[in-house]
Image (cartoon, helix red, strand yellow):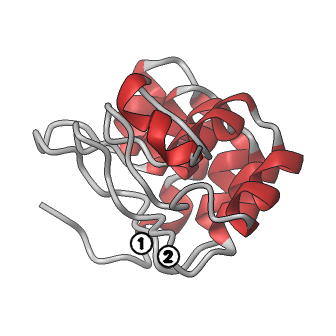
């Protein structure tokens, strides 16, 4: 039986599970056997990379960021970006990893244009992560 056949029964599957739990040694083998699309969305619109950022699993993030099909600037169903997930949960390592990517906007607002990663971080009491975000803000054109 193909592992993809189980997808209709569960809220997330394949790469989402090891990405959520930070099991880096399972990510590459699952990609190699083509068990799952490395940029597939789950029921919340989260990709495996979004779950890794959300939970601060930098090792998993680095593996997934090495995949050509992975879009690190794609928001979830609510418009939250990887920066929003990492910063709002206080994952400094994940924020630093994302700041190292030139093609990712650390100031991208959610779909409601009310919240940006910096506001998520400060609202959740993560001042260390909030302080990191403006460091790239000046190099990126503002979004409205």
Q: Position of residue 43 (x, y in %)?
A: 32, 32
* Mark 1, residue position: 138
Which mark's residue is nearer the viewer, 1 or 2? 2
The residue at the point 32 percent across, 32 percent down is 44
In the rendered image, the vertical position of residue 121 relative to residue 75, given as above or below: above
- With 101 as the anchor, is 88 left or right in this view? left
Give the Cα distance between marks 1 and 2.
28 Å
Q: Which mark is residue 87?
A: none
Residue 53 visible in the current orientation: no
Q: Which mark is residue 69?
A: 2
Q: Are marks 1 and 2 in contact (CB under 8 Å)?
A: no
- With 54 as the anchor, is 124 left or right in this view? left
Residue 91 visible in the current orientation: yes
The residue at the point 40 percent across, 64 percent down is 73
Q: Position of residue 94 (x, y in %)?
A: 68, 47
In the rendered image, the vertical position of residue 100 relative to residue 84, given as above or below: below
Mark nearer the N terminus (1 vs 2) = 2
In the rendered image, the vertical position of residue 43 relative to residue 100, given as above or below: above
The residue at the point 35 percent across, 57 percent down is 107
Q: Residue furthest front?
A: 1
Q: Secondary structure at mark 1?
A: loop
Give the mark count. 2
């Amino acid at each position: 039986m193909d592992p993809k056949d189980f997808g209709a029964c569960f809220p997330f599957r394949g790469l989402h599970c090891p990405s959520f739990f930070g099991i880096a040694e399972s990510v590459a083998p699952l990609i190699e056997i083509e068990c799952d699309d490395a940029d597939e969305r789950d029921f919340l619109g989260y990709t495996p990379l979004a779950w890794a950022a959300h939970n601060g699993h930098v090792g998993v993030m680095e593996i997934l960021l090495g995949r050509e099909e992975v879009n690190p600037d794609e928001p979830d169903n609510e418009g939250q970006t990887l920066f929003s997930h990492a910063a709002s949960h206080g994952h400094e390592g994940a924020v630093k990893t994302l700041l190292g990517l030139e093609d990712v906007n650390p100031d991208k607002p959610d779909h409601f244009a009310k919240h940006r990663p910096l506001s998520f971080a400060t609202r959740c009491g993560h001042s260390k992560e909030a302080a990191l975000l403006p460091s790239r803000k000046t190099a990126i054109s503002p979004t409205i």
